[in-house]
Image (cartoon, rainbow, N blue to C red):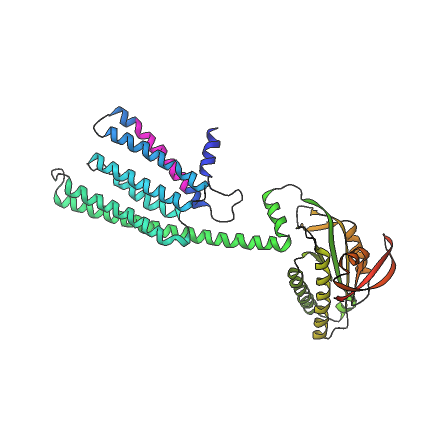
Amino acid sequence: MVNATLKAWVNSGIPSHPTGNINPIRLTNIVAMLMIFVSLLQLTSIVSFWGNTSWYQLHLIFCTSILLAHVPILNVLHAYRAAKALLILTYAFNILMCCLLWEINLNLQYFFLIAVFIFPFLFYQHERTIMRVVAMSFYTLFIGFELWFFFSEPSSLMSLHQQMFRLICASLFALSCVLCSFHLWKNVNRSYKKLSEEQNRAEQLLLNILPSSIAQRLKCSPDLIADYFKQASILFADIQNFTALCKNLSPQQLVSLLNEVFCEFDNITKKYGLEKIKTSGDGYMVAGGLPIISSSHAMQCCHCALDMQDAFKKTCKKHNLNTGLRIGIGCGEVIAGIIGKSKFSYDLWGEAVNLASRMESHGLCNKIQVTESIYRITKNGFYFDNRGPIEAKGIGWINTYWLLSKK
């Protein structure tokens, strides 16, 4: 119970799946908790040595604890700067009042130097101005109390020379604390920045492999990802006579050509809001209506197929290639998910996938073959030519159409 409470306090205001540096938020909660703990420890001395200032000290502890208890609440409300401000002001007020209540040099002012070391780490890199103001404010408070005690304490205990030397050493020590704090804060934030860049790079690599929504689900939960889609469209594109083309090109030329073609296809796919599933050799697979459901998935695939056809013709003309592109589109029920532990990918299974694959493999060069279901959904937006029934391997006889152009 105690561990759960402490954990909830420390993680107050931190998102379930943080994407950035959360240490300033967590440190704010931790410092507030430690300050309450240290303040409560003073109760034993107050009760044991009850004096003139004890009543005021008791009120100070009570007020400090109440104020600091609001720090995690403010973080939960995402008022992060307000939480930091409350923590810093409460800390400064507590030390200030303690020094004034006791009226003698108990070295309580050195707690200001602890703040100089700790509080800069409550701020992010872009809050450096606020951090410097806070650090210099605590430094000024320390020097101010050192001077106050220097002029207010009787000089019978130490000579003036000793007092001056003590004041100079204290000032230099405080300045060293400030400089060390700035240096540490700068290096820590530089490390956080590099870590963030690496995390963003890893995130981008993951998004290049998986759809964004699937990547988020995979990061949040290790559970098996398997989704059923009642209606989705699948597009397959394949370069005609690719094996013969490989013999006439060097490895560098071949890879460069495929990269140019598929990068152009990626842009077209993104333009129409479709999801690239995978490439296999010279084959390119696209899906519409998943993982985010869309009612216009068939229209999007038809637009994408026509643009792919035009883009590939331009590439062939540019490189003087005597080849073409076969494209097939089908729609229907689809199961989508991720299988395996290494080199995994988001893949599709179902009748729609088989139909689209057969539309491509049983198609003709520079032609877009679609199923009758695609034709019925999109006939108001495109021109088609009825090819008639064909026998598709593993499926049987089906009626197909050639997609010609937009209306």
Query: In the image, 198: left or right of 173?
Result: right
Residue 166 in sight: no
Residue 206 in sight: yes
Q: In which quarter of the image is residue 328?
A: bottom right
Counting every numbered tag in the picture gives 0
Q: In which quarter of the image is residue 377?
A: bottom right
Q: Residue at x 27, y 24 (%)?
A: 47
| Front residue (pair 253, 277) | 277
Farthest residue to the top: give it. 48
Q: Give the range drawn in magenta.
A: 28-43
Image quadrant in which the C terminus is located = bottom right
Residue 32 located within the stretch drawn in magenta: yes
Point out residue 280 in the picture as x, y percentages from the top left corner: 73, 58
Point out residue 4 in the picture as x, y percentages from the top left corner: 49, 32
Point out residue 252 in the picture as x, y percentages from the top left corner: 67, 68
| Front residue (pair 222, 367) | 367
Query: In the image, 202: left or right of 253?
Result: left
Query: In the image, 152: left or right of 137?
Result: left
Residue 380 located within the stretch drawn in magenta: no
Query: In the image, 319: left or right of 55?
Result: right
Q: Which residue is drawn at 25% across and 49% down?
A: 172
Point out residue 306 in the picture as x, y percentages from the top left corner: 73, 65
| Front residue (pair 49, 55) | 55
Q: Which residue is drawn at 25% across and 36% down?
A: 98
Q: Is the magenta stretch mostly helix, strand or loop?
A: helix
